[in-house]
Amino acid sequence: MSERIHKPLAGRRELIKFAGASLLLLVSPVGRAAADRNPGILAVRVWPAADYTRVAIEHNAPLKYTHFTVKNPDRLVVDLEGIEFNSVLEGLANKIAPDDPNIKLLRAGRFKPGVVRLVMELKNEVNPQVFVLPPVGEYGHRLVLDVYPLVPPDPLLLLLEKNESLLGNMGIQVEKRPEPNVEIKAERPRQGKPIVDRLVTITLDPGHGGEDPGAVGSGGSYEKHVTLAVARRLKAKIDAEPNMRAVLTRDTDFFVPLHMRVQKARRIQSDLFVSIHADAFTRPDANGSSVFALSESGASSSAARYLAQKENAADLIGGVNLDVKDPMLARTLLDLSQTATISDSLKLGKAVLGEIGGINRLHKGSVEQAGFAVLKAPDIPSILIETAFISNPEEERRLNDDAYQDKMAEAILSGMKKYFSKNPPLAKSKLARLD
């Protein structure tokens, strides 16, 4: 899928360094030399997903560009000024997979002297976003083409389609309307005694993805792949429970902005939000699993503060279009009046940490707290789990082991069930609603 893979933490240097309360983003060698060279295309990476497809074009110096859309058929056209047509652009058509949900074809050619034209043929009508990213970490300048379907996939409708028969068996009636409003009404099942009175929805968030690989182990393991593997195993176990269902913030290798992860959970009124990661440190002997919750008033330790800063920088690495004004982002990430939710998050974290301690050493024996952006849903108990240190060679091997991944997923589920046994979710007359 990618022309080249960057390893920002693999034997070279840390992407982010912590010094006091400041965050320093290191500029890549490509970025430092950019001012002395004419723009040239270094790599093109394509990340297809049902949510959207991203095309990231990396270049060694700032470039000028213009873009427009064409109808019948739908196309996105981007003109790049002041660059030469090279072998990277020549192989552009081979980057698009036949099963890409949004892009049919991508090609490039010389349009006129000093201008290369990119033409993206689309499978359906899209809402394109075209923006640039400055050098960060091992990346140089990037021109990003994000194509979002005009009608995006709805996580609630997908959940309903997959579980309608099961909901009926549990005594939960689903009312479908021609208008985009869907209500789920829950009643207590007549048979059996589940943990709670209704279907519980849990959002699982595999950390990083796409342009953001996360931490990289000395053996070449990518955090984004490990987190997705554990999350898929955990989802399968949750879905096998009679009264629980899980939704993934990403089910393939693509980048999801931090606020969108929170928004997806709130969209379906999740009962829990669990973000899955793999820790890293400069010293290879650091080891153990950890669980974190949000803090209203500062981090519980300097290490927790450092980790939160590192994880919050995912948007800078993965690449967020800052020109898009999202009112949901402001409401979600700035609402810190959530004392009750944090209290529940700590209870959930304690239950999960206790179970994880049965399969791996704990890095710290209590739930830590810091200002993680991805944990800031004001109404959903949320935790972040560092499953192990991918920077530790032994733990890196375990993170790639099917048996360990399965044990980790089982431990997390067991912790959730223990939490629900003491803190059953309140009944909801409207479990989820589409506005």
Image (spheres, grey):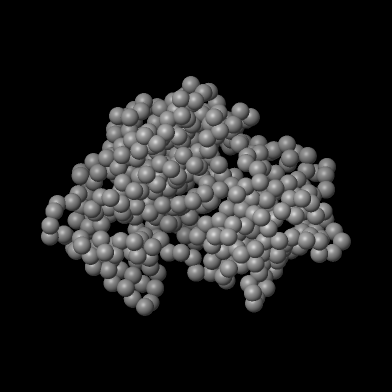
Of the pair 51 and 313, the residue shown nearer to us: 51
User: Which quarter of the rendering shows the C terminus?
Assistant: bottom left
In percent of width and height, residue 306 lies at: 51, 33
Residue projecting furthest to the top = 285
Percent of width and height locating residue 20:
55, 31
Q: Is residue 352 visible?
A: no
Q: Taking 215 as reference, is 164 left or right?
A: left
- Could you say where residue 54 lies in the image, as x and y percent from the top left? 60, 56
**Identity of the residue drawn at 73% across and 46% down:** 42
Judge whether residue 34 can be spotted in this image: yes
Residue beneath the point at 13% across and 53% down: 192
On screen, residue 315 above or below 129: above
- Numbered marks: total: 0
* Position above or below: 418 against 218: below
Residue situated in front as seen by the camera: 253 or 201: 253
Q: Is residue 407 above or below residue 162?
A: above
Q: Could you tell me which residue is drawn at 25 percent across and 57 percent down? A: 199
Residue 369 x %, y %: 40, 37
